[in-house]
Image: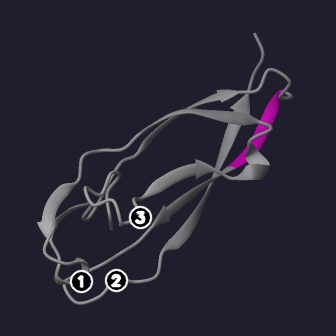
């Protein structure tokens, strides 16, 4: 899949966002994308493109809203990506990632 950044302005990078329904519970403060490996793919021209292959870890720092009630809370992330190989690119896709948080008050 394309990395973030891709190294080519015309290509859509992989992105991690909070689902709009989760934004009242947490806010996404910082997302850290690892560096991609640069390769030339026949499907994307002659330029080197930054890619993630096999396994990748994207780190996200969030802050729980002050008004969030204590207890278990389900939030959802959306990972948007596009997979390609030397011959073709698939359509961009979005993967929903549910996560249960335990909200506690001091």
Residue picked out by circle 3: 12
In the rendered view, would you say 1 is above or below 44? above
Marks 1 and 3 in Cβ contact (< 8 Å)? no
Q: Quadrant of the C terminus?
A: top right
Alpha carbon separation for disc pair 1 and 3: 14 Å
Residue picked out by circle 1: 43
Q: Quadrant of the N terminus?
A: bottom left
> Looking at the image, is mark 2 or mark 1 earlier in the sequence?
1
Q: How is the image coloured?
A: one colour
Query: What's drawn in magenta, residue-wise?
Result: 70-75
How crowded pointer 3 is (Cα within 10 Å; few <14, some 14-19, many 20+) is rated as: some
In the rendered view, would you say 103 is above or below 58? above
Where residue 28 appears, as percent x and y from the top left, is 60, 36
Furthest residue in direction front, as rendered = 9
Residue picked out by circle 2: 89
Which residue is more in the foreground, 53 or 100? 53
Is the stretch drawn in magenta largely helix, strand or loop?
A: strand
| Disc 3 versus disc 2: nearer the observer | 3
In the rendered view, would you say 52 is above or below 74? below
């Amino acid at each position: 899949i394309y990395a973030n950044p891709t190294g080519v302005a015309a290509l859509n990078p992989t992105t991690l966002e909070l689902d709009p329904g989760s934004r009242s519970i947490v806010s996404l403060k910082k997302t850290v994308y690892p560096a991609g490996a640069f390769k030339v793919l026949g499907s994307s021209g002659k330029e080197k493109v930054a890619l993630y292959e096999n396994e990748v870890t994207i780190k996200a720092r969030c802050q729980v809203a002050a008004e969030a009630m204590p207890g278990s809370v389900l939030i959802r992330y959306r990972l948007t990506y596009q997979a390609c190989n030397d011959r073709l690119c698939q359509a961009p896709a979005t993967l929903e990632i549910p996560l249960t948080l335990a909200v506690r008050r001091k």
